[in-house]
Image (cartoon, rainbow, N blue to C red):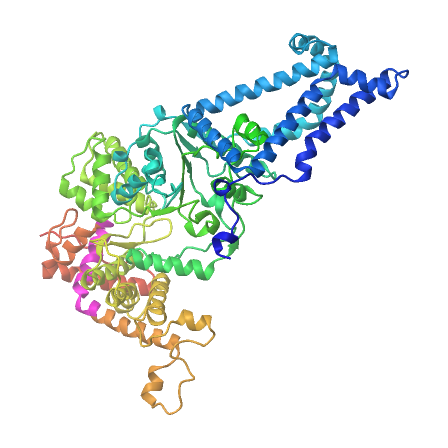
């Protein structure tokens, strides 16, 4: 037997109707018989003098409708029998219903839905009329007018019963009903003015999303060729990158209603409320989809609904004195942060996907749909025909999250969420476009070259952060009595947003000088050896978690990192330790702890993970399989001493690598001693310098804030050297330096 022959045939492939079971043939006859017996019993109870035969005859005469219905049921069963044995008769009815369906579909889905509701109401009125007719012994049409009288006579009893029910259930039913409200906002097409032209800096994602508008605008172009219309999108990426704006623009471009689902809409303390909200939401979506031809529903922070309940957390890296991660490249900082999270993480239970809410959502996204309409569900089944499928609801589900790893896999499978797009940080061109868009809304004096420079200076900015910084620059300008934003306003706004307001703290002279030398060592080494990063700013103003810092930015968008770049990052980190020991006669502060932590973490990953050390194997894999550190003890017998020395323990090799880089940092600082002292003097003078001014001081050129030309004067540099010696002596003896900070008088 072939696979096709062994499979159950579809209804369209059957020549005759499927045979009914005995119960299905007799169930309505049993119901009518039971009804007839109940009526006979009721008549006998009212008239004890009646015999059973007389009562049966009287009920038969007064309730002929039972026999009429039984006759109709008999005709129906005859119809079934003929369809089960005569294929032409069955095909005739199949053809008839196909013709009926073509006529019915001339009316829109929404109108058919309203007509079915009216027909259903009329049927219930008819049933009520028949019941009242039997009670009052009147024709059904006349008895229907007795309904108000019947209701009024039963009103006292109904009121008492209603009061008792309400009193018992009000605390639960009403509470659950109110709890199932809220958290869902509806925006109709006239309420949405957002378009794709309002989404800046994410052109590549917008172009892909435009393709998905076919789901709502012309779904038949896919279905007529045998495909199915995808119904779900996931937008994931960092916060503030425009995910919500994109979803709103999708609704605006298509002219469909937009349903916004609040992240906490399904979080409730009572079991079942979240399920009720999901069911209510999708009933609303189906109605809107039929009325408007489609609808867009947006779940913001989808991880609150669909997470698996475990989230890894950890503490951020901090330091005593110097903000050890700020002068590192962004990728290095991300690596450090990730490692801290992995090593210091803890499992926290949570998420709003519990108590059946997520399961209800999954069911609504891909579950079976119940047939709609009275004629479809009742009449067609009465005649033994299969109900037609429910209408195709054009519902586009859009979800957004910055934690895609927390979403349940069942939610992300094809058929539910079919496409996933990463909405990442905008590229340089995207940032330029975003800056231009927000600057066009205000008065400014920035040149196109300055806007491009600003985009380079803020490599990991989002649309939200760019908007906030432009707004902060406008506030600064207005506070200074101006209405137009200048370049200086933008720089001040950038510093305040990235570093926060500086604390009103005045360092004592020797400590100020030590901090300035510390940061100058970072800056000079970064300027000399790190070509893949530009210095953004250097400051010795105290912030909330730092005493000073040197921040760097990439000149271009870069997606690949190299060994030489990580080594330069480590050199910049170790510059503080090498510099303090060199300039303070072997002494160093606790402020280098953050720098050492950064350098050690990067060196460990280079040696044991990234293939940038003396071994090839991965420390993470070896640890997972419990085979020890790569290059550790236990090598083959017979290797010579040099080979065994090369394959020492991992920690020893990391220490050796760091020592080699520390020696190199010391050599660079010796070669650039004059530049370090010059930059330290400039930091003590101006406290904060932008990156261009740092380079100007090192190169003895004129900058925007600081003039580096005086540092080419040997006599002035001699004064700075004497001042440094005085600060070192004061540091050793814990007193105030005898020489004040030199001022150029040339």
Residue 593 painted magenta: no
Percent position of residue 336, x then y: 36, 60
Instruction: Name the residue located 20 percent from the left edge and 57 percent from the top edge.
Output: 679
Q: Is residue 374 visible?
A: yes
| Numbered-mark total | 0
Magenta stretch secondary structure, dominant: helix
- In the picture provided, is 158 more to the left or to the right than 178? right
Does residue 379 sit above or below 428 in this rendering?
above
- In the picture provided, is 528 more to the left or to the right than 653? left
Percent position of residue 93, x then y: 51, 31
For the residue pair 167 and 321, the one nearer the viewer reads as 167
Task: Find the magenta span and give its range.
Answer: 668-689
Instruction: Name the residue located 23 percent from the left edge and 54 percent from the top edge.
Output: 554
Percent position of residue 11, x then y: 51, 40
Instruction: Name the residue located 38 percent from the left edge and 57 percent from the top edge.
Output: 337
Instruction: Name the residue located 40 percent from the left edge and 90 percent from the top edge.
Output: 637
Q: Is residue 723 visible?
A: no
Most extreme residue toward the bottom, as rendered? 638
Does residue 426 sit above or below 586 in this rendering?
above
For the residue pair 204 and 85, the one nearer the viewer reads as 85
Does residue 97 sit above or below 665 in this rendering?
above
Most extreme residue toward the right, as rendered? 49
Locate residue 35: give its quadrant.
Answer: top right
For the residue pair 680 and 311, the one nearer the viewer reads as 311
Percent position of residue 565, x then y: 24, 64
Residue 688 painted magenta: yes
């Amino acid at each position: 037997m072939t696979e096709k022959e062994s499979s159950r045939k579809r209804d369209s492939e059957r020549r005759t109707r499927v045979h009914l079971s005995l119960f299905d043939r007799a169930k309505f006859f049993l119901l009518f018989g039971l009804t007839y017996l109940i009526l006979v019993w009721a008549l006998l109870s009212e008239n004890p003098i009646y015999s059973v035969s007389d009562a049966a005859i009287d009920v038969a005469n007064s309730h002929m409708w039972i026999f009429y219905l039984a006759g109709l049921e008999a005709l129906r069963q005859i119809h079934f029998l003929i369809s089960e044995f005569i294929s032409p008769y069955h095909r005739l009815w199949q053809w008839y219903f196909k013709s009926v369906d073509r006529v019915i579909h001339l009316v829109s889905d929404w109108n058919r839905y309203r007509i079915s509701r009216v027909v259903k109401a009329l049927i219930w009125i008819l049933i009520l009329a028949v019941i009242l007719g039997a009670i009052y012994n009147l024709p059904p049409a006349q008895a229907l007018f007795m309904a108000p009288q019947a209701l009024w006579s039963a009103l006292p009893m109904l009121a008492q019963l209603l009061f008792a029910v309400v009193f018992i259930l009000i605390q639960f039913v009403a509470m659950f009903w109110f709890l199932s409200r809220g958290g869902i906002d509806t925006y109709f097409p006239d309420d949405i003015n957002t378009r794709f032209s309002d989404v800046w800096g994410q052109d590549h994602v917008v172009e892909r999303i435009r393709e998905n508008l076919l789901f709502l605008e012309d779904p038949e172009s896919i279905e007529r060729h045998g495909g199915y219309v995808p119904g779900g999108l996931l937008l994931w990426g960092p916060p503030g990158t425009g995910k919500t704006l994109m979803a709103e623009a999708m609704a605006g471009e298509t002219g469909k209603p937009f349903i916004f689902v609040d992240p906490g809409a399904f979080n409730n303390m009572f079991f079942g409320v979240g399920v009720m909200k999901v069911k209510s939401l999708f009933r609303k979506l189906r109605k809107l989809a039929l009325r408007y031809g489609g609808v867009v529903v947006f779940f913001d922070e989808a991880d609150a609904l669909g997470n698996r309940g475990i989230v890894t957390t950890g503490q951020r890296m901090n330091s005593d004195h110097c903000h050890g991660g700020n002068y590192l490249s962004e990728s290095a900082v991300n690596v450090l942060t990730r490692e801290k999270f992995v090593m210091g993480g803890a499992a926290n239970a949570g998420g709003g996907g519990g108590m059946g809410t997520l399961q209800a959502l999954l069911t609504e996204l891909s579950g079976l749909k119940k047939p709609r309409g009275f004629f479809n569900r009742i009449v067609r089944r009465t005649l033994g025909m299969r109900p037609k499928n429910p209408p195709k609801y054009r519902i586009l589900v859009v979800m957004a999250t910055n934690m895609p790893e927390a979403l349940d896999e069942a939610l992300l499978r094809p058929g539910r969420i079919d496409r996933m797009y990463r909405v990442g940080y905008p590229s340089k061109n995207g940032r330029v476009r975003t800056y231009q868009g927000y600057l066009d809304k205000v008065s400014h004096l920035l040149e196109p070259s300055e806007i491009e420079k600003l985009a380079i200076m803020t490599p990991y900015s989002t649309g939200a952060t760019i908007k906030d910084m432009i707004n902060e620059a406008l506030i600064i300008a207005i506070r200074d009595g101006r209405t137009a934003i200048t370049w200086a306003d933008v720089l001040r706004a950038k510093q305040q947003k990235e570093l926060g307001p500086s604390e009103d703290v005045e360092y004592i002279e020797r400590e100020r000088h030590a901090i300035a030398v510390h940061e100058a060592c970072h800056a000079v080494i970064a300027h000399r050896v790190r070509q893949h990063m530009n210095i953004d700013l250097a400051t010795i103003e105290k912030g909330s978690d730092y005493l000073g810092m040197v921040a760097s930015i990439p000149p271009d968008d870069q997606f690949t990192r190299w060994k030489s770049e990580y080594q330069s990052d480590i050199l910049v980190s170790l510059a503080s330790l090498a510099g303090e020991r060199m300039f303070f006669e072997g002494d160093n502060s606790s402020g280098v702890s953050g720098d050492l932590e950064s350098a050690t973490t990067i060196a460990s990953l280079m040696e044991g993970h990234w293939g940038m050390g003396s071994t090839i194997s991965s420390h993470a894999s070896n640890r997972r399989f419990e085979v020890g550190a790569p290059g550790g003890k236990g090598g083959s017998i017979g290797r010579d001493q040099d080979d065994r020395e090369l394959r020492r323990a991992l920690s020893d090799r990391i220490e050796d690598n760091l020592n080699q880089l520390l020696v190199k940092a010391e050599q660079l600082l010796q070669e650039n001693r004059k530049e370090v002292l010059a930059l330290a003097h400039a930091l003590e003078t101006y406290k904060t310098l932008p990156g261009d001014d740092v380079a100007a001081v090192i190169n003895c050129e004129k900058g925007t804030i600081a003039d580096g030309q005086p540092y080419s004067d040997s006599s002035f540099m001699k004064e700075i050297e004497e001042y440094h010696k005085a600060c070192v002596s004061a540091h050793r003896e814990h007193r105030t330096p005898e020489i004040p900070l030199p001022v150029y008088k040339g």
